[in-house]
Amino acid sequence: MVTVDTVFDLLSNERRRYALYYLHEQSGPVSIDELVETVRTWENDPPTQNALEEVDALKVELQHHHLPKTAEVEFVQYQPEQGVIQVEGTSPEIDALVTIARVIEQPEDG
């Protein structure tokens, strides 16, 4: 069972929140590349000369830190070998917390 503390810990990092918001809205597996692009867009940072390096760094950070951490809860299925992740089987309470956080934060497409 997932505790409120666990959900708040998952939501404590902006990149992890953005990933969870997006995954929560999808009805199936999402590719890591699609997730990286969405998180990057929602961060709304203007592109720099090192945009490709920044995308690569974001992908590495998500793949090796944030996504494994989210996969510690039973409603996140992360399959690094296939390069996909999805949220499935969340409780109404978890849905409510993620939805409320998303409404408050309102990440927007750049």
Image (cartoon, grey):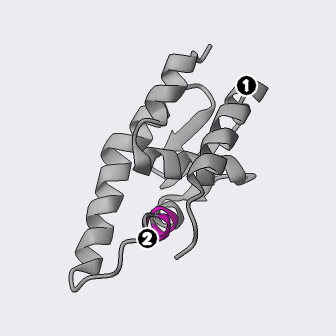
Asked if residue 72 shows in the view, the reply is: no
What residue is at 36 percent from the left and 72 percent from the top? 45
Above or below: residue 108 compared with residue 95: below
Q: Which residues are magenta?
A: 37-42
Asked if residue 53 shows in the view, the reply is: yes
Residue carrying label 1:
93
Left or right: 48, with 19 as reference point? left
What residue is at 48 percent from the left and 55 percent from the top? 83
Residue 88 placement (x, y as % from top left): 70, 38
Q: Which mark is residue 17?
A: none
Tag 2: residue type?
A: Asn
Image quarter for residue 98? top right
Residue 61 placement (x, y as % from top left): 30, 51
Image quarter for residue 64? top left
Q: Secondary structure of the magenta portion, mostly? A: helix
Above or below: residue 39 compared with residue 14: below
Image quarter for residue 68? top left
What residue is at 60 percent from the left and 41 percent from the top? 101
> Decide: marks 2, 1 in contact (CB < 8 A)?
no
Q: Earlier in the sequence, mark 2 or mark 1?
A: 2
Residue 18 placement (x, y as % from top left): 51, 52
Q: How crowded is the residue under tag 1: few (<14 C-alpha within 10 Å), some, or many (20+)? A: few
Residue 17 placement (x, y as % from top left): 50, 45
Cα distance, mark 2 to mark 1? 29 Å
Q: Which mark is residue 44?
A: 2
Tag 1: residue type?
A: Glu
